Amino acid sequence: MPSAPTAAPAARFPASPSKSTFGWFLAAAFAVVLALSLREAQVDPRLLVQADAIANAGRFVRGMVPPALGAEFLGSLARPLVETIQISVMGTAIAVVIGLPLGLLATASLMWRGSLHERTASLRRAAFGVLPYGLARVFLSAFRSIPEYVWAFMFVRAVGLGPFPGVLALGIAYGGMLGKVYSEILEGVDPRPIETLHAAGASRGALVVYGLVPEALPQLVSYTLYRWECAIRASAILGFVGAGGIGQQVELSMRMFQFDEILTELGVLFVLVAAVDFVSGRIRGRLVR
Amino acid sequence: MYQLRSVSKIFGDGLRALDGVSLTVGRGEHVAFVGPSGAGKTTLFRLLNLTLRPTEGAVLLDGVDVAALDGAGLQRARRRIGTVYQQHNLVGRLRVVHNVLAGNLGRWSLATALASLVRPRDAAHAGGALEQVGIPEKLWARTDELSGGQQQRVAIARVLVQDPDVILADEPVSSVDPSLAVTIVTLLRALSHGSRKTLLMNLHSVELALGHFPRIVGVREGRIVFDLAPDKVTAELLAELYAGNRDDERQLEGMRHAIGPYGGACRPLPGFTE
Amino acid sequence: MNGARAAGVGRGSTWAWWTVGGFAALVAWSAHGARVDVVALLGPEGLGQMAAYVGKLFPPDVSLPMVRDAALGTFETFAISFVGSLLAVVLAFPLALLASRSVLYRGILYEGQRLGGGERTARIGVYAAARGCLNALRTIPELLWALIFVFIVGLGPFPGVLALGVHTAGVLGKLFAEVIEDVAPRPIEALQSTGASRLGIIVYGILPQAAPQFLSYALYRWEVNIRAAAVMGLVGAGGLGQRIHVAISLFHEQQLLTLILAIYVIVTVVDALSAYLRARLL
């Protein structure tokens, strides 16, 4: 059993934890930003409970039910539904075409860093390694940061209306995202099999094809499928701004205040998203094994 | 304290983890459970600490059938039973002080519990418990920064704060450095003896069990095969108990040649052989 | 090549070839349906049109009133994304708890006692309702939510905040619920053995384990939301989006470029902040 304590209680164990200055700073910064943002965004919860807000909400909900289920209307949704799928697939395909090469170029361990390049002269490394790497990173960043609909608007100016500008917009914006994540996946690959191949004299191209891609393939495909799921939703949004698909239907219905149509369109979108989630989830599950 | 009457536990997949177990443990008794892995010792303990319900038979705690307990009554009963697990007792991201004070959760209101997370209520009590287990300086450390042995001691400190009537220890030293194992077993025995608590311990090491406990229960394939004082436990009984388990048999061989994992045979604490 | 392929995809490479073939067919069909005309795009006329358009964008309008307007739009967009993401976390929290089976009716917290048939059914009902609610919130795109809220409370950035908050709550709620369900069960069992109430176990055992992942998802989602906030303006919800809509409608291409640059800046800033916080706090 413990011997009788001789020291005063406070000396036996520390009285309080060491303070963390970063924690306090963060909390203060958070409070300030929150206060400013609430004002800037004109947040006023009272607006939600005012009479006309509730009346509008009521009109909206009542207008939705019952959902428009006429045969003619449902038939008119078939083409937009198909279009949404096509836009999402094509957009993702273009995104892969753009994202994969840029992603490869943006992989530091492939281009200039690490064991593959230890014996390369620094000038050569800079010209053929760092420079393309930097450029690829900048492009990917620009593609990712500009929202799809801005790209869509610009492409509409360039190639006219219809689903094509939406596809291109998706392709570029998602290409940026895919490229970045591809490069992260490729960086995270186990380097040892690559180094073995390199030591055996393989060229960089062969390294990529025989070493890097097969190792990373499950993750690459998995993320691409996930992006496809997002693309379905993005196609719906792009449709809002005129790029076809279900989104365009929703915008039309909204403009004409046909809330019951909106409910049906949302239902269709919901089923579509669930189906794509399911298929993509299945494939990704298979990949993990 | 405890009475088990023909208790069986059958899991959803048909596994019969316990089969017709009957056992009586009096207040203040110290009992060690030995047997091969998968014998059902952990399931038995989870029945004893009211995590699981028996499929057949009855578990009585101080004469009250556990099956009748629900909601608040179950909580109150659980508060009287403190458990130390083999590992992962604690929430790694919390500071040690919170993990230790969690022993109070059975008696604190939700508001008090929440407030304590912001500013620990009664940190001195936690400090005292940590002192009893030998690591007072770790009071404010993050729990996942401690070694396995230290974390185990924090778990014991939590049980001290909880102050239950029964302490269940499920292989408390199997994941701990062997040099520390004797210390921890001795500590638990001393703490329980000092406050007249009932102590039930699952042990992988037969040597530890025989050297420290006045009553040994052998469990094999969901059944109790013997329930004796340590000097009545023969080598044959042990061989039968562990038959077919290669690692355990090796353990027994070592004991036969007086070479245990702790170097030499352990001696029981004086005054405990009845 | 075959070996490398098979090594990457594993057994069942015939299944893999089928999938690849299926996708190829899917892409071809989609290209046709989406009227993808690569020739028109990359041909002399297409390239010429694009070059002409790009030419009209440069140089960006950097006059003082324009820059000030862009800055205001940027602050507004940032504020919408910040408050919206925060609102989302606040809403997602309780929904996620209600949408986790391990909190509501299954698992280690419910082994020691039998839930009466009626109560169990009621709890399963609550779980299903919470999950359904989260799905509904998620599936409705942010833009549509923005339209709905503009309809209810009028124009301005506030409906944008609400839209982001409600939609992201659906996304985060589902992710949070998965984290809650995946929490390490042994510390939970140990806490339960002290006689703690279920709420006490949630606060001491589940939340501390889940918090880092919650924060990570919330910060990551903020990166998505800053882009979404920029878009909200299209439907009247303020910020840069609204100004972009105006610039496009009035064919002020140079102002458009300024605004696009502003978007690029704020998105990069938020991305960097999010990455920094995630590295520092987790």
Image (cartoon, grey):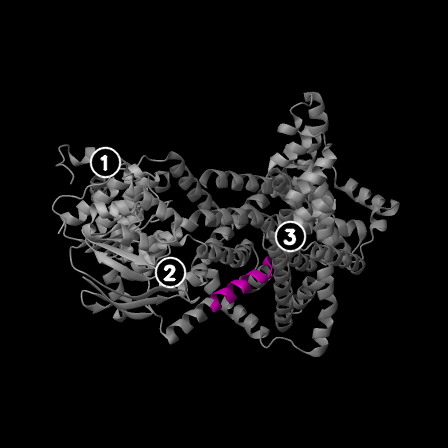
- Please determine if labels 1 and 2 lie on a single subunit: no
How far across and how far down the image is residue A255, in percent?
66, 66
Image position of C128 with respect to A44: above or below: below
Which chain is mark 2 on? C
* Element on which disc 1 rests: loop
For residue A14, what is the image quadrant? top left
- Please determine if labels 3 and 2 lie on a single subunit: no
Q: In terms of secondary structure, what is the magenta stretch mainly?
A: helix
The 10 Å Cα crowd at callout 2, few under 14, some 14 to 19, many 20 or more, is some
Q: Amino acid at mark 1?
A: Phe
The 10 Å Cα crowd at callout 1, few under 14, some 14 to 19, many 20 or more, is many
Residue tagged by mark 3? A227
In front: label 1 or label 2: 2
**Is A121 part of what is drawn in magenta?**
no
Residue tagged by mark 1? A13
Give the residue drawn at x 35%, y 60%. Answer: B221
Q: Which mark is residue B92?
A: none
How far across and how far down the image is residue C252, in percent?
72, 46
Q: Amino acid at mark 2?
A: Ile
How far across and how far down the image is residue A122, in percent?
68, 21
Question: Residue A156 or C113: which is nearer the viewer?
Answer: C113
Which chain is mark 1 on? A
Q: Which residues are magenta?
A: C128-144
Q: In the shown orientation, is residue B72 left or right of residue C88?
A: left
Image position of B51 with respect to A42: above or below: below
The span from disc 3 to disc 1 (Cα, nearest Å) is 53 Å
Whether residue A272 is visible, yes or no, is: yes
* Element on which disc 3 rests: helix
Q: Which mark is residue C108?
A: 2
Which chain is mark 3 on? A
